[in-house]
Amino acid sequence: MKAAIRLAGRYVLLLAVLAITVGPLLWQLSTALKGPGEDVYGDNASWWPRNLTFDNFVKIAESVPIASYMANSATIAALAIASNLVFASFGGYMMSRPGWRGRRAVFLLLVLAMMFPFESIMISLFLGIRDMGLVDTLAGAWLPGIAGAFNVLIMRAAFLAVPSEVEDAALMEGAGEWTRFRRIFLPSARGAMTVVAINSFIAAWDDFLWPLIVLRSEENLTLTLGLSRMSSSSFGVDDKLIMTGSMISVIPVVALFFLAQRWFYRGVASGAVKM
Amino acid sequence: MINTLSPAAPPPSREPAPQVTAKSGAALHRPWWMPWLWCAPVIAAAVVFGVFPFVNTVLLSFTNAKPLGGPSGFVGLGNYTRLLGDAAFWSATWHSVLYALVVVPLMVILPLLLAVLVEKKIPFIGFFRSAFYTPVLASIIVAGFSWQWLLRDDGLINGALLATGLAGEPVPFLSDATLVLFGAMAMTVWKGLGWYMILYLAALGNVPKELHEAASVDGASAFHRFRHVTVPGVRPTMLLVGTLTAIGSLRVFTEVFALGGATGGPGGQARTLPFYIRDVGLDPVTGNAGFGAAASVALFLLTVGFTLLGQKISRGEGS
């Protein structure tokens, strides 16, 4: 009996935390589905849409170039995922292999690179991107995040955890380095690769300060920049449309996370985060 | 590219001891340049977008370079003396430090309590864990829209305060500079909870179960077990979280932007250090990249100071 009460108490607490963590985002969803004339704020605003409608997802395209924002965010995110997965796998693999000079120096270089907070080098980064002629281009928004040092160390840790017997067996069969990398190491680091992919996607898709500095013209804005500009517009944009844009920004990330969560937690559990 | 308090870059712990196995045989078949080829993209990225920009920031801080180019000259320590005499710089620095002072204790404790709450494998716990993670997935700008709804004069919190009579008139959460800063802190904690919960969950898995059982047999209350078994077991993670959130707090920008607007609160009075750096260094017309670089060096030194403090605490507790 006492155990049942305690379990019930646990669920009450869990539901309370659920309301605090997810509630504010569900409010956005509810607002995005409200029909014209419904209040968003104040005493008359309802929790659930009175006239449930998906019209706002069509209407938003009439007031801002939402498709272009999405395409820009997706382009930068796709580039970031691809470059981080490929480069972090290559670098992390070789850094996990003993027996070559300079291995430790590369490790220390990556640790050093992580020590500088982005905000303390953003002026210099901007000048660099400016000198490359990449201001106000999607490439300029993507490049500084091309191969995050943290992602490399995640992959390195995953490859270090591969049992040496497996590799030795492959060596006996005369498998070359590329074959060992493709057939043995990459498949066993799937959890870490999921973590790297999700990290890179969220970092690029949700990023704000760097795109704010480097992107200027309307046709190059990302979703977060576009939403921010939309909400501060003096033309009085309908808040239901802003929340609709918010949902367009959040739903892909949440969907991806829930699809990949099994691998994600496995990657975290295998020490990808602990290192 | 880089989030403030979410999956950013924690300092890695020590390098695992290299495994000494028969693998050296494989290395013999590898030309000396092969490893460098594999690592070339990673090395290039670390140098071009990490180490070089920092070195360049230090060099820039002695010049009066302009963000959009043009002639610039050496000004010695001029930027630094000007910086130390600028009240706006000290105000921004104070806001960043205050942010850390408030956020760090909350972020060290609350996600740990949350991890303890979701640790036990009961039905639907997987759903709760993932649901608690969703704020991590939202961008700060998107989260800001929800927090504006919470904090507006006609928002949820003011509605509750007025209805219960706790406040006679709406609290100006979004129009008072100090309150904007505290609202941003609340949002930071809300958004970071899930991420640090996962870190703590991983650490809790390493606390020996026998210790909990022994404590239960001895009749220790849940609070006592938390205090004397759980907390000592996850202390290294608590110090890691403390250091990470301290650095993240000093770097905070977007949360203040999301609630206080592009100016950084009314009249720019809620600006943090990165806000200041952007305003003085990158404004196309009035910006002085050299002066902004000096402020950037100050931000870097501040993060180094907090990191060293964290290490000192962990060493003091280790002995």
Image (cartoon, grey):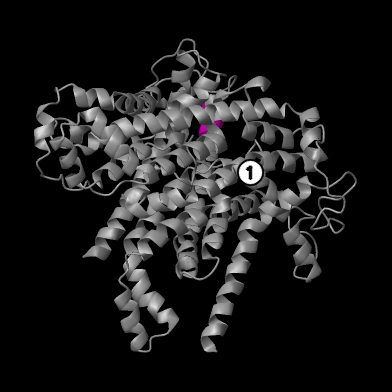
**Looking at the picture, which amino acid does disc 1 mark?**
Ile
Looking at the picture, how far across and down is residue A268, in whole percent? 39, 52
Q: Does residue B108 lie above or below B307 as drawn? A: below
Report the residue that reaches farthest toward the right. Answer: A37
Residue at image position (25%, 59%) is B315
Q: In this view of the protein, which residue sits in the foreground, B61 or B253?
A: B253
Question: In this image, A103 relative to A28: left or right?
Answer: left
Q: In this view of the protein, which residue sits in the foreground, B306 or B34?
A: B34
- Could you tell me which secondary element the residue under label 1 belongs to? helix
Q: Residues within 10 Å of mark 1 (few under 14, many from 20)?
A: some
Q: Which residues are magenta?
A: B277-281
Q: Chain of mark 1?
A: A
Looking at the picture, how far across and down is residue A228, in whole percent? 67, 36
Question: In this image, A98 relative to A88: left or right?
Answer: left
Residue B80 seen in this snapshot: no
The part of the image, by quadrant, that contains residue A250 is top right
Which residue is tagged 1? Answer: A251
